[in-house]
Amino acid sequence: MGQGEASARGTTMEGDCLSCIKYLMFVFNFLIFLGGSFLLGVGVWVLVDPTGFREIVAANPLLFTGVYIILGMGGMLFLLGFLGCCGAIRENKCLLLFFFMLILLIFLAELAAAILAFIFREHLTREYFTKELKRHYQGYNNTDVFTSTWNAVMNTFDCCGVNSPEDFKDSLFRMINQNHMVPEACCQRASQTGELAYINKEQCLLGNMMFRNNKGCYSAVVDYFELYIYVAGALAIVVLTIELFAMVFAMCLFRGIQ
């Protein structure tokens, strides 16, 4: 009789634990679902917004790429949250297994990205970017992805070259544009009637320091993202931890369903 009561008590505790995991997983995935829905909504709004914001984004390759990254992340989180919620509340082993495999793939992809970033970290040095700028930057050919990206960076951060405007000496840009010391994207601009206009483009192109941006883009970008790099690192650790717990919860629930 004592053994029967102990067995029944153990079964009850196991059922309570399984129920707790089930509802925790539902709440957790419902929050993911809401986050994914919000990102999808923002991405779609930017793409179809009739007030002109779409044209602003389309004119800047960095912002344009960012919108599709937001859409991709939103879609992925939306699907993950939906699968997790349905799998938990319906106790569907097939959905839980699919959810587990999807989380595992994302986790492995993030791990691979971290390893590759560590292996190729020397490609993020000033010397590497300077060498690539000298070899490939053309100045005014916006059909070239490398050139258009650099133009967007210099316009966005009000900078010039990697270290300074001197980076354009002995470069492909100077070979193509022999009368210009720096590209147009390096020229200082001022707001006039709500629009940005060059202060003195002719003098800037001739190399006059008064009318060009003299700060290098490497320092400008690092200064801008300095705080966000630490936040992103902390966020990445949190996300990886959440993914690990999500996989553990999904597998526990999967194994507990009869």
Image (cartoon, rainbow, N blue to C red):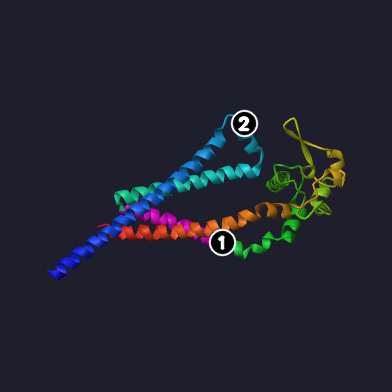
Q: Position of residue 41 (x, y in %)?
A: 50, 38
Q: From this view, report whether residue 108 is shown above or below residue 66.
A: below
**Residue position for label 1:** 114
Question: Is the N terminus in the top left, top right, bottom left or bottom right quadrant?
Answer: bottom left
On the question of residue 166 being in view, the answer is yes
What kind of element bears circle 1?
helix
Q: Is residue 28 left or right of residue 218?
A: left
What's the amino acid at mark 2?
Answer: Gly
Mark 2 vs mark 1: which is more N-terminal? 2
Residue 207 visible to an observer of this rendering: no
Q: Which residue is mark 2?
A: 52
Indicate the amino acid at tag 1: Ala
- The image position of residue 205, as x and y in percent, is 84, 43
Observer-side mark, 2 or 1, equals: 2
User: In the rendered picture of this protein, how many numbered marks are placed on residues?
Assistant: 2
Is 183 on the left or on the right of 54, as rendered? Answer: right
In the image, residue 211 sits, relative to residue 109, either above or below, namely: above
Question: Looking at the image, which is closer to me, 190 or 201?
Answer: 190
- Magenta segment, prevailing SS (helix, strand or loop): helix
Dot 1: few (<14), some (14–19), or many (≥20) neighbours within 10 Å? few
Residue occupying image coordinates x 63% and y 34%: 55
Q: From which residue to which does the magenta span run?
A: 93-114
Residue under the point 64% across and 45% down: 62
Residue toward you, 220 or 73: 220
Quadrant of res 211: top right
Task: Tell me: residue 247, above or below residue 157.
Answer: below
Question: Mark 2 packing: few (<14 Cα in 10 Å), some, or many (20+)?
Answer: few
Residue 198 figure quarter? top right
Question: Residue most toward the bottom?
Answer: 3
Q: Position of residue 209 (x, y in %)?
A: 86, 47
Q: Residue at x 43, y 46 (%)?
A: 33
Helix or strand or loop: what does disc 2 sit on?
Answer: loop
